[in-house]
Image (spheres, rainbow, N blue to C red):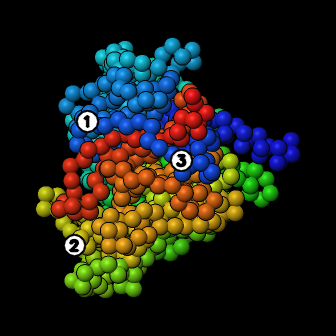
Amino acid sequence: MPYLLLLFAALAASAQDHASWSDYGGAPDSAQYSSLSQVNRDNVSQLEVAWTYPTQDTNKYSFNPLIADGRIYVLAKSNSIVALDAASGRELWTHAEPDTTIITNRGINYWESPDHRERRLLFASNHFLRAIDARTGETIRTFGSNGAVNLKEGLGRDPATLKLVQSTTPGRIFEDLLILGSATNQGYGSAPGDIRAFNARTGALVWAFHTIPHPGEPGYETWPAPQPGREDAWKRIGGANVWGELSLDSKRGIIYAPTASAKYNFYGADRAGANLYADCLLALDARTGKRLWHFQMVHHDIWDYDDNTAPKLLTVQHDAKPLDIVAQVSKQGFVWVFDRVTGKPLWPIEEHPVPQTNMRGETTWPTQPFPTKPPPFARQSFTVNDLSPYLTPADRARFRDDILSARNEGLFTPPGERNTIQMPGNNGGANWGGAAVDPTAGSLFVVSKDLPAMLRLAKDPKLNDENFYSGFGFMLASDGLSPIAPPWTSLTAYDLNEGVIRWKIPLGDVPDLAVKGIHNTGTLFPKVGPVVTAGGLIFTGTRDRMVRALDAATGKVLWQHELDTALEGIPAVYQIAGREYIVFCASAQAGLTPATQKPIHGAYVAFALPAKSSGQN
């Protein structure tokens, strides 16, 4: 079949796969894309509120709703899972787990049997994996032990010593499997970041991939060699986990997993070596957990440069033929692009020498990988010439002195006992939910923030002399603003057929500045992911309480609507009875400082065209 016909066939299949929203991020591939086009560039200005469902508490939520069988599932009412009628927002049932302290609050998983008789919602709370009936909200007692599976078990460590093994991000459903990552804390003694697959019917563990390899496994040699009295050194190290988002090529049965740094984040004297499979993009066989290929973005990470945005799966034209690829965006502002099957980079990746540590006991890696293409989407340096014009004189003087006295040698300046600058920061660049693709066009859209950090290692009096710690070091002015000149948040559009940036815009405003007539600064601390539609639109929202529809071709704002509360999470796009809806989670703080923050009165807000415009009577 000619290459163009192959490409058109792939694009048609891609469009069919993205018409519903029964998975976190819209589909197993995490595209954050909808093939629906009823709402488009020509009529988006007519959008109106179709229904609203209050969260009925003052909690912050960042939930991506799921839609299945005419129902929409949300998180509300003190971390309860609530089923609503997707056309009206009418509440159908509520499932509450008592004494919930942690839950997968960014989304949940939906599974149904091939005959559609069994329909389940799978989620984790209080370190237990749970299953409930999607039609009734009732606990499925045959799952695990009386409806729950202890996630602290089966990790090769004493469960009583593990404080955190549950991510707030859901996993991925493949056939009868739920594939999960985990959060593991940030410090010494954290849990290992095993990627695990559980049977969606029974809760039984099916496979596990050790991101910190066990003796005899490939990659074990990249960790400290056994020493007398420390033969099990590999058991003392945690992390290398997937606390962010997984993506699935369901046709090939490949799960793509972006892993985090090993722990402790900022000092690695106890984990000499490159530390596979920390800071990697892993491609695993979804049925068995077998490693197919990997690429490590950071060797021996001491910067907390974990990748947590979902890998994006799409088809591009490369070397004059269609190619299925996976694209990974990072905290450093890089876009890494690989052949989805082989792991071969589309463009050269070069190892460059980087600054070395002067910390006793620490051995940093001499080089780090840099992609030659596409260009980065975030700023990667911060000097006194980059200070914001909106700083007070006192803040400007303070930051100037701090920068000039700090070690400041680029992305890989190693933390030490002297201040070191990090840019775009360990909480900058791209984060969870922060990217979307149009798989029919080879387009990638990235929401990113520039938030410089300043790190400084110090001894922890509660630990021995071998260990050091540092805070995350976010650099913020006295009014809560970032010290770097805006834009603080940007939306960047890439053409991955060519590996180039098509356009880039500031995304959102800061309300405290907007009232003074200062716009286009980009919002602060964005946590709303973009969604792309076949109608040529990008839907997103920010902490300035605005939901927006942008032209995907240009970035121009075509429609916006102000809500009562700031937004977080990924919106969902779906169609019921011939009417297309876009629903947002508006349940976050808009204020920059405690003095400007107010009680949250959150809600899920669904928009649609007027009934007549959408073809309804």
Residue position marked by numbered label 3 in the rendering: 46
Residue occupying the point 34% across, 22% down: 93
Left-right relation of 46 to 472: right
Q: In which quarter of the image is the C terminus?
A: top right
521 is higher (above) or lower (below) than 43: below
Q: Does 433 sit left or right of 304 as displayed?
A: right
On the picture, is 223 further left or further right than 348?
left
The label number, if any, that marks residue 478 in the structure image = 2
Q: Earlier in the sequence, mark 1 or mark 2?
A: 1
Distance from Cα at disc 1 to Cα at disc 2: 33 Å
Pair 3/1: label in front: 3
Q: Can residue 109 be seen in this view?
A: no
Q: On residue 381, which mark appears?
A: none
Residue 20: x and y, percent?
56, 33
Q: Relative to 212, say whether 366 is above or below.
A: below
Quadrant where the N terminus lies? top right
| Above or below for 609 versus 486 | above
Q: What residue type is labelled 3?
A: Gln
Q: Give the crowd class for mark 3: few <14, some 14-19, many >=20 residues within 10 Å.
A: few
Q: Distance between the residues labelled 3 and 1?
A: 29 Å
Type of the residue with mark 1:
Gln
**Element at label 1:** loop
